[in-house]
Image (cartoon, rainbow, N blue to C red):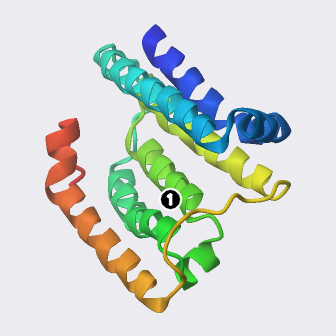
Amino acid sequence: MTLFVAGLVLFFGVHSISILADGWRNATAGRIGEGAWKGLYSLVSIASFVLMLYGYGLARQETVLLYSPAGWSRMLAVILMIPVFPLLFATYLPGKLKTLAKHPMLLSIKFWALAHLLANGTLADVLLFGSFLAWAVADRISLKRRAARPLPGPPASALNDVIAVVGGLAVYAVFILWAHAKLFGVSPL
């Protein structure tokens, strides 16, 4: 559990710099260069993500059940997951979907985390998915107070929305029918 919690703290620590210290982040990026900042940020993010996932795998072996999900909650989780990949795609494919969602990646994370909290009741699951949900809510609130950084990508178009929805649903179908069981050892169905 120690590695898992360390991974969570490091991962969300680095991902919360803009929430807690946006001025410091901008000053540091200005001093060392945006490319160097992004490189350092990426290295810490990847390392902490690997630590978090490895720790999560170890923590899952010590099953501490906090609650037993209701039978209907698994099906609700499957339904809540439907918009996750289209919203994730819309983050990088500007169009009406991105405009309506405002921050589609954060909305995607909220749906993903809530769905998994409904379907899983162990301590490790609650720590993982609850942390992501709490962070996404905090980041969304903080975005109301700070200027959004531009994301590189194609210009806004209706085709981007089609690609986001069709591509996202295709990835969801692969995930629910095959990849989730293959990657995580649990079939959502």
Query: Residue at left 55%, top 53%?
Result: 110
Query: Residue at left 82%, top 34%?
Result: 24
**Amino acid residing under circle 1:** Ser
Q: Is mark 1 on a helix, strand or loop?
A: helix
Query: Dividing the picture into quarters, in which one does residue 184 lie?
Result: top left
In this figure, what is the number of numbered marks?
1
Q: Where is the N terminus found, in terms of image quarters?
A: top left
- Which of 133/18 is in front? 18
Q: Where is the C terminus found, in terms of image quarters?
A: bottom left
Asked if residue 183 lies left or right of residue 14, the reply is left
**Picture coordinates of residue 174 (x, y %)?**
19, 61
Up/down of 143 relative to 155, above or below:
above
Query: Residue at left 51%, top 17%?
Result: 5
Asked if residue 72 lies left or right of residue 19, the reply is left
Whether residue 187 is visible, yes or no, is no
Which residue is denoted by mark 1 in the rendering?
108
**Picture coordinates of residue 165 (x, y %)?**
38, 78
**Picture coordinates of residue 2 (x, y %)?**
47, 9
Asked if residue 188 lies left or right of residue 98, the reply is left
